Image (tube, helix red, strand yellow):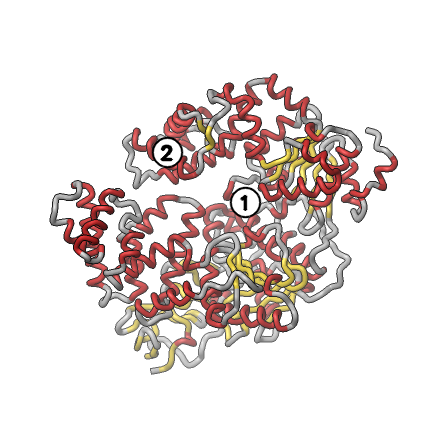
Amino acid sequence: MNIPAQSMEAPYLKGLNAPQREAVLTIDGPVLMLAGAGTGKTAALTARLAHIIATRSAWPSEILAVTFTNKAAREMRERVGRIIGDAVEGMPWLGTFHSIGAKMLRRHAELVGLQSNFTILDTDDQIRLLKQVISLEELDEKRWTARVLGGLIDQWKNKGLMPADIDAGESERFAEGRGAKLYTLYQDRLKALNACDFGDLLLHMLTILKSHRDVLEEYQKRFKYILVDEYQDTNSVQYLWLRLLAQTRKNICCVGDDDQSIYSWRGAEVANILKYEKDFPGAKIIKLEQNYRSTPHILGAASGLIAKNGERLGKTLWTELNDGDKVKVVGVWDGPEEARRVGELAEDHQRSGGSLDDAAILVRAQFQTREFEDRFISIGLPYKIVGGFRFYERAEIRDALAYLRLVNQPADDLAFERIVNVPKRGLGDKAVAKVQTLARLQRVPLTQAAVDILETDELTPQARRALGQFVRDLASWRDRATALSHPDLARAILDESGYTIALQAEKTAEAAGRLENLTELVRAMEEYETLGAFLEHVSLVMDNEASADGEKLTMMTIHAAKGLEFERVFLVGWEEGVFPSQRSLDEGGLASLEEERRLAYVAITRARRHCTIFHAANRRIYGQWTSSIPSRFIAELPADHIDMETSMAGGETMWRANWASNSDPFAHLQRGTGRGPGWQRASGSYSTTPSRVVEARSSAISLGNKGRSDIAFGQRVFHTKFGYGSVAEIEGNKLEIDFEQAGRKRVLDSFVTLA
């Protein structure tokens, strides 16, 4: 099309580099704007929208612009509004996938058996409806939970699958082959209620577009231009929906970065962006590679790491900024020292004139924040958790603490009320209300009222059985509190109450994260001599809520940090099994490894000037110190861009050679084991083979594997926790010792003395 000459001088083009300008001006035909981290893709995308409207290539109502979040949609609308003024108000088709899907569906609801005023169910309503469906099929809802079924149906909808599309293999994933039938019953109930869930908003429209050609042609004619943000995060149904709408005009511009595709657990398909040229032959690929955020060393480290991925389109980020500091890799002795070192560096950053608001700790999993929170509270360093709750404020932690409080103090009525029916044990609100009424009348704690009411006929048989079991469990846990260590008592409570089983049954990423948090809670208890001391510590932590005012150090997961940037970034827990996540590797093999590497790339590129990566030589798991090895991602960082802090000359070279010694370092993943080189299962945790053992001293790490020369087989030794024992096996600096009281344990030689 003809573009007015004056458009080259348009205000929205000022400040754009050459590739950005090309992306703005190339409005006809399919375009993929491959935008690396910090390369100004939002500026280019909004300028493109403004250009289409300013040149009258289309009216605002003829443009479809989709984003993933309401925040992104608002930002785009505001930016375009600043350029073109009130014309932006005429863009009814700028919004999220779900909001636009809902708007379309209300216009054509009758074509899928709904009325235009249909209700969109929230998660709670959806779960209630699924419970009804499961109950009608006379299934055990404790075994086949509504939450698991809801997650499975959501997966199917993200893939664009209606009930009739579910094959036998997929159906077997729930209730011994009844998954497809339950999906059908659920959809029927939704239609009867004139309702749909979020997954239906696009799935129903996809069905309509595929089966009603007149509707499809209406939208193909309406939308002269289509713009899509964060294309690498699209799932199958979003991809199919977009491809149908763009078939006729093919004026579709997708903006994304295959190297930042990190949401497969939400249904995102990185393949969608990788096959863009195949889907739209003749598509123009415009790479935005000039980074405006980070220094050359940070970009060099991130680019060298992501280059190890095989499935990517490829681009090279560069910047005009000065070199700045290299990415620092710091090895520490253990988790507590990691927290100390980060706290010290954060305080140094503040003392040197930096703001805590411009510094962040990024973790792979939420449970990792606990050690840092405890440390920062003890030294008075203000912090905030973004994208989640403080560790002790998370629902599963508060539930576990309520159990522990009630065992420690039977008169704790608040704890009783919180967990009397958590997890669900068949106690309705009426039954609990009767216990509360009796407690008020007799002026006794709820636990005593519960015991007393069991001697009456006030409760239904089902409620009496459930409450009776709960009371007996409480008594049993109190009796064992003196015989068991408080961490072991906590494990027993979580298992015997059914709490752990309930989370395991969900089989979701969220439930797995909650289980990790509970494991970390039990680990935290090991640091205190008694249950009372631990609960007192938690009370002090909860009471030490920082003021809403003032600077705060940010803590968040890497996933939550996507799209953000900070002057100084601390990346912690870069060890095999933690990052890359062992659970992810076990579930997804090589594909998951590449996504974990993309996650590492996202983490590094959040930093503007300073990036520090930490890994610990040891982590304590269930009271045992277990050796860890640095993440393979550290070995993949280009040496020219990193500064390794080691305590032994040549340590870095030897360690890198260790990883490189495997001619096919990912063969284990292709065989489906999902484990990194040198990893073995040992006593429920991961240990390393001799060539991978990491020996650490104080705050620096020595990448060697030599054990103590003064310890031999049969040697009698003493351990401060396990007492006296004899050495049964030696593997580098790790020992297996038969302790006289504790049995056989695996420990590090530095934790024992000769007896």
The residue at which mark 2 appears reads as: 130
> Residue at point 24% right, 47% down?
432
User: In the current view of this chain or complex, which residue is farthest to the front?
Assistant: 441
In this rendering, the answer to whether 557 lies above or below 140 is below
The residue at which mark 1 appears reads as: 263
Measured Cα–Cα span from mark 2 to mark 1? 26 Å
**Side of 323 relative to 632 (left or right):** right
Q: Amino acid at mark 1?
A: Tyr
Mark 1 closeness class: few <14, some 14–19, many ≥20 residues within 10 Å: some
Mark 2 closeness class: few <14, some 14–19, many ≥20 residues within 10 Å: many
Q: Amino acid at mark 2?
A: Leu
Q: Quadrant of residue 709?
A: bottom left
**Side of 281 relative to 435 (left or right):** right
SS category of the residue bearing label 1 = loop
Q: In front: 107, or 101?
A: 107
Q: Which mark is residue 355?
A: none
Q: Nearer the viewer, mark 2 or mark 1?
A: 2
Q: Quadrant of the C terminus?
A: bottom left
> Residue at point 55% right, 37% down?
235
Q: Position of residue 434 (x, y in %)?
A: 21, 46
SS category of the residue bearing label 2 = helix
Tell me if I can see residue 573 in this picture. no
Q: In front: 479, or 193?
A: 193
